[in-house]
Amino acid sequence: MTMIEPLLASGIATAEQQVQFAIDLPRDPTDPRELSELPEVRLWFLRLDARYPWLPFVLDWKAGELGRYTAMLVPHQFHPTDGIQFNPEALELFVMGKLFVLADWMAAQGIGARSRLQGMAQMLGYDLEGGLFDLLEADR
């Protein structure tokens, strides 16, 4: 979290899609679990999300950070051939919750949200209609 404070001081909008995580956790080399299966790592991400709910805005989506972040917060299973499989209902709630938080936060920052949020949702497998954004904008 010490890395985020300088981003806030310099203007968070300048850090859009630039943050990557480097998780250095000593582990038993025979432990087969993924990082998202380690309770202490997931708890750290849960705290991070609670403190900075707008964090997906600054994550480097192209480097896979949005997917990793989502995996830390949304129940899922790993399949050898299909990869990560999110719980569909949990993923839907996560995406919509982030959409609502980010839409309000971005409006307060003076950042155009519609295309960015549609892109975020698409990265997580959702196509959002423009009418949803019309409703959000009318609600402000």
Image: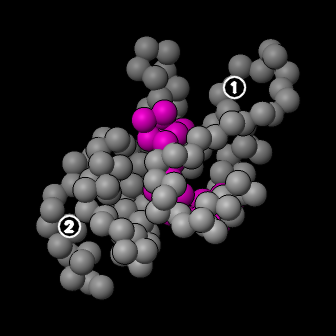
**Image quadrant occupied by the N terminus:** bottom right
- Segment colored magenta: 47-68
**Count of labels in the image:** 2
Q: Looking at the rendering, which quadrant does residue 32 occupy?
A: top right
Q: Amino acid at mark 2?
A: Leu
Give residue 94's position: percent from left, percent from top.
Answer: 44, 56
Could you tell me which residue is drawn at 30 percent across and 66 percent down? 112
Question: How far, Cα to Cα, is label 2 from label 1?
Answer: 38 Å
Q: In the picture shown, does residue 101 fall above or below 19?
A: below
Give residue 138's position: percent from left, percent from top.
Answer: 21, 82
Determine which residue is flagged by label 2.
Answer: 132
Could you tell me which residue is drawn at 46 percent across and 23 percent down? 83
- Local secondary structure at mark 1: loop
Determine which residue is flagged by label 1.
Answer: 33
Q: In the picture shown, does residue 81 fall above or below 113?
A: above
Q: Residues within 10 Å of mark 2 (few under 14, many from 20)?
A: few
| Sequence-wise first label, 2 or 1 | 1
Give residue 16's position: percent from left, percent from top.
Answer: 46, 53
Q: Is residue 125 left or right of residue 128?
A: right
**Image quadrant occupied by the C terminus:** bottom left
Check residue 58 for magenta coloring.
yes
| SS majority, magenta | helix
Q: Looking at the rendering, which quadrant does residue 116 occupy?
A: bottom left
Give residue 7's position: percent from left, percent from top.
Answer: 61, 60
Check residue 119 for magenta coloring.
no
Q: Amino acid at mark 1?
A: Arg
Q: Is residue 30 left or right of residue 95?
A: right
